[in-house]
Image: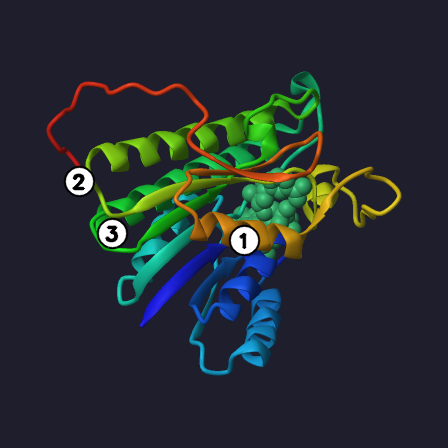
Amino acid sequence: MKYTVITGASSGIGYATALAFASRGKNLILAARRQDKLEQLKVEIAKINQHLDVIVKSVDLSVAENAHTFYESLKNYEIETWINNAGFGNFASVGEHNLKKIQSMLHLNIEALTILSSLFVRDYENVDGTQLINVSSAAGYTLISNFVTYSSTKFYVSAFTEGLAQELQSRGSKMKAKVLAPAVTETEFEKHSLDLNEFQYEGQVPKFHTSKEMAGFMLNLYDSDKTVGIVDESTYEFHLKEPIFPFREGTKKASTAP
Ligand code: NAP
């Protein structure tokens, strides 16, 4: 039995992606903090395919130790695809932003994603058919004012994942690493970024994709040989591309992985 892991599966893009992978007959390991939402998703998945094995894990990934424990808890499952999707944003200028929230964002968007990517690569780099998909953003390729810190976390996600993809390719590894870079997508994202109880996209945002559309793009990226799947913010078209950042080979050091 092979599994697809999706972090941030309790709402938005992660929730829709879980349904999309279920439609492909994939067994799932779903993580987020809200257990009730994950259980609800499990019920929805059973309606698509009652034979799938769906494991639900409630975990706060903004705590580094939890990311390690979460990964360790999956040791007995064979993982085929790992999708680091959990993340959140914040709309504020740097001098005015809430540092407690920002620190949590750095821990989740950067630290947890790096820990989970590294552990997955360490264990599965040479397993046929494995994929790591990290969810960045169109804001992970273009800096946006009053969104600079979030945007920078996503530049990290894009750069780290593209660099990893190139490293894996130059080592002849079997694993593929890929970046999904959505533009505005109708989820709980705006609500959390603006610290609101509710947010209506319709009527307030000129252009956006639905989570279901984004999950479809995720599958397009999953099926392709390209490294980057990105939404063009001017046309809202989805494009599959080779790595975007410049890259060169560096000096290789002997392995010191603990
Ligand atoms: P969302 O509906 O708010 O989903 C975020 C997911 O992350 C939820 O399942 C949430 O679950 C989980 N999460 C948040 N904090 C967590 C924590 N500390 N530990 C574990 N899980 C946590 O927003 P979304 O738009 O689908 O976001 C998914 C990804 O897409 C994010 O990385 C986001 O940056 C990226 N993105 C979104 C947009 C957009 O316009 N929506 C555009 C570009 C990129 P719990 O609250 O249950 O923990």
The residue pinned by badge 2 equals 258
Query: On the rendered image, what quadrant is the N terminus found in?
Result: bottom left
Q: Name the element at disc 2.
A: loop
- Is residue 147 visible to the viewer in this orientation of the structure? yes
Indicate the position of residue 230 as horizontal and vertical percent values: 56, 37
Kind of residue at disc 1: Gly
Residue located 24% across and 47% down the image: 174
Q: CA distance from mark 2 to mark 3?
A: 16 Å
Residue located 27% across and 67% down the image: 76
CB under 8 Å between callouts 2 and 1?
no
Q: Nearer the viewer, mark 2 or mark 1?
A: 1
The residue pinned by badge 1 equals 8
Q: CA distance from mark 3 to mark 1?
A: 22 Å
81 lies above or below 84: below
Q: Nearer the viewer, mark 2 or mark 3?
A: 3
Q: Name the element at disc 3.
A: helix
